[in-house]
Image (tube, helix red, strand yellow):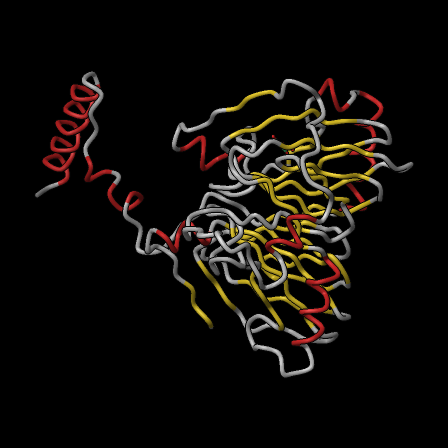
Amino acid sequence: MNASAQDAVKDERAQYYRRISGQNMTPLWEVLGALVPKAPKSPVAPALWRYGEVREHVMEAGRLITASEAERRVLVLENPAMRGNSSITQSLYAGLQLIMPGEVAPAHRHTQSALRLVLDGEGAYTAVDGERTTMRRGDFIITPSWTWHDHGNLGSEPVVWLDGLDIPTVRFFDAGFAEHGAAALQQTARPEGDSLARYGHNMVPLDLDQKASEPTKVFVYPFAQTKEALTGIARTAPDAHFGHKLRYVNPATGASPMPTIGAFAQLLPGGFETQPYRCTDATVYVCLEGAGSATIGDTTYTFGPNDVFVVPSWHTLNLRASEETILFSFSDRPMQQALGLWREEKI
Ligand code: GTQ
């Protein structure tokens, strides 16, 4: 075909595309490569939030709006490549929530599942379905789908934690429901520690029979226990790709604590460098202790305590610890695994 014949074909096709566009139709052959990629091409960008740089902004929100006025006083960590979406990855949301002394974030429930990772300050609690838990730094706390929850601060200092929710996933399914509690504070139905005693000590009540898709009734994973586990396994040689890494589980089923979000904790010995690794679950990391650097694709970030960074799907991750370091992380891995989609590659 000569050049003018080629132009004529192009022209004819363009006119055809315009005609069918009027009927809300588009030719697959123009978009097939993007729809069915050879490998994930994520619109998510690697990013890092340095706690030292954002803390002041979080604290300023405490002067500008009350927790009850805001309902939840949170600065959303928006992926820089997806501003306006309230997403840190395609499926997950993250934010920094602040609660000032004496304040209450009123009781509500929603179909979105939430996790909290306590970062800064002491004296706050979260109440989940009638039981309060005192929030201590590094504690991993969950509020599964449709459980009542409120937060309060009985102490004398501001408290900040990281929220992780499956908001974009629930939005994708258009399955979001929410309700306000009749009162700001839930009635306490059980003493603090009851759930952990009942479900969190390798024992369960006689009649408990949970399906793998049900969330755990252990709604706090105290950091003291996590650290004991990590330092315990750190007496043996680290894994080349993960260091010393464990996943949080529903102890009654072995599945993830909540069906939509997986959570992990890992210890990297001082001076340790992980071998490059990639997986399809875009992952949010939080540095709890220590310091180091993360190379995500071709971007390198240094990180220290309370810094948050995000690794997009199928981006190579390489971690270096300049001192003994503990990282918490969460992702949508259990959803991908349930759907048979999850892949990883150890490089
Ligand atoms: O604490 O219930 O960051 O409902 C976003 C939505 C926190 C919460 C968020 C929420 C909450």
| Residue at the outermost bottom position | 236
Image quadrant where residue 28 sits: top left
Left or right of residue 1, residue 212 in this image:
right
Which residue is located at x 55 percent, y 57 percent?
A: 204
Image quadrant where residue 291 sits: bottom right
Which residue is located at x 51 percent, y 62 percent?
A: 316
Measuring from the top left, give residue 303's x and y in whole percent: 73, 57
Measuring from the top left, give residue 196's x and y in whole percent: 66, 53
Left or right of residue 15, residue 63 in this image:
right
Image quadrant where residue 58 sits: top right
Q: Nearer the viewer, residue 31 or 184?
A: 184
Q: Is residue 45 above or below residue 246?
A: above
Q: Nearer the viewer, residue 334 or 317?
A: 334
Q: Is residue 60 above or below residue 80?
A: above
**Screen quadrant of the N terminus:** top left
Measuring from the top left, give residue 295's x and y in whole percent: 61, 62
Measuring from the top left, give residue 142's x and y in whole percent: 61, 44
Which residue is located at x 63 percent, y 83 percent?
A: 237
Quadrant containing ligand 1 reads top right
Tell me if I can see residue 81 in this picture. no
Q: Nearer the viewer, residue 81 or 208?
A: 208
